[in-house]
Amino acid sequence: MTVEPTTDREHADLVARTLRIAPSTWQSVVARYVATGASYGQSVRDRLQSLAKSYALESPHQAPLPTYDELAPCSACHAPTVTPLIARRNDPFVLVYGRCSTCGHGSLLSGASPPSVYERSIYYQERDDGGVGYDAYELERAYREAKGRRLVEWISSRSERPPRSLLEVGSGFGFTLSAARSMGLVTCGIDVNPYAAAAAERLYGFDTFVGTLGEARARAELRLSSESWDVVLYQFVLEHLADPAQELREVAALVAPGASLCVVVPSMSAVEVEVFGASYRSFRSDHLHLFSRRSIERYLASAGFALVAAKTTCSLHLFRGFLTAQEMEALYAEECGPDWYVLARRLSQ
Ligand SMILES: [Zn+2]
């Protein structure tokens, strides 16, 4: 059977939006793929390789890799084994990502957005050409509340006893906190973006601390110190920070031994990196880090946490039409999905 994903217009639009390419580019990729004669009779790896070759010929993002005289050691494992891997055309700049050959961690070597990008109101209103920011964020409320509920259920199912309280850093509009509250948890949110904090108050009546966890701790915020937090949650936050290890040490100083830390971050080990190269969805100028299982473990250990559970998954399936649903699930089970979901426990001192 020959695969013909072009017939599914909705999926083609999803892929084009996620990879930030023109729909016509994706149609050309699919046409090239079909011309290779790839079929469900071939192995998953063979089909993905055919797709990768077809994609490389059409990629609008692929750029020549610059050379570097010297690179800093890996921020996760500290080995001097980071080498440039991918250059992405992101007009007018080029983003360059390196990968550590020791732990697999990905780091942005050049082309980073200024940190002030997160404090602008526009961050939750518009997505720029480089993929930074969110559009239609509030319109996705029901979807994101449901996703938040599934996440809190996953955390609970992996915890020794049901958590009673949850602190979210980077709580945005409060979608996950709202789900947690409806499940009976005491909640608190922290976010550097005042526009998001105002939206969380308007939508749910939440009193979000505007700033970082470090700032909240330095000011001895009552909202934080009045609770002994069972869970601290970071969803798509650590990849934006220059020093994720320092952030996790702030968490370790806040919570008691046995408390849970849940981290959701983009993966550097995703099969999409191999297939889409520079167009991989998480290569964007505000992503300073992309994680591997080993790099996550190193960051956690350096802050006094031990990994309890980890999985990769994603709700936007770009390989539909190329892989069956079962093949897709098997890939994610091999930890090749685009997003890491990690649960860790604070160790005793
Ligand atoms: Zn490393």
Image (spheres, grey):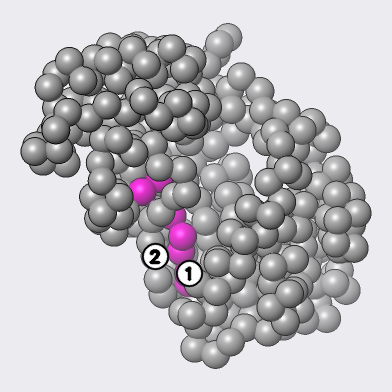
| Magenta range | 337-344
- Residue 179 placed where, x, y %? 69, 68
Residue type at mark 1 is Leu
Question: 10 Å neighbourhood of mark 1: few (<14), some, or many (≥20)?
Answer: many
Measured from the top left, where is residue 127 in percent x and y? 67, 28
Q: Residues within 10 Å of mark 2 (few under 14, many from 20)?
A: some
Q: Residue at x 60, y 42 (%)?
A: 240
Rendered position, 272 above or below 251: above
- Whether residue 123 is visible to the viewer of this picture, yes or no, is no
Residue name at image x 32 percent, y 28 percent: 5
Judged left or right of residue 42, residue 342 is right
Where is mark 2, residue-wise?
A: 310
Residue at image mark 1: 343
Considering depth in this image, is 246 or 182 the residue closer to the camera?
Answer: 182
Is residue 145 in sight in this rendering? yes
**Which disc, if any, is residue 131?**
none
Q: Is residue 282 above or below residue 237?
A: above
Q: Residue furthest bottom?
A: 161
In terms of secondary structure, where does tag 2 sit? strand
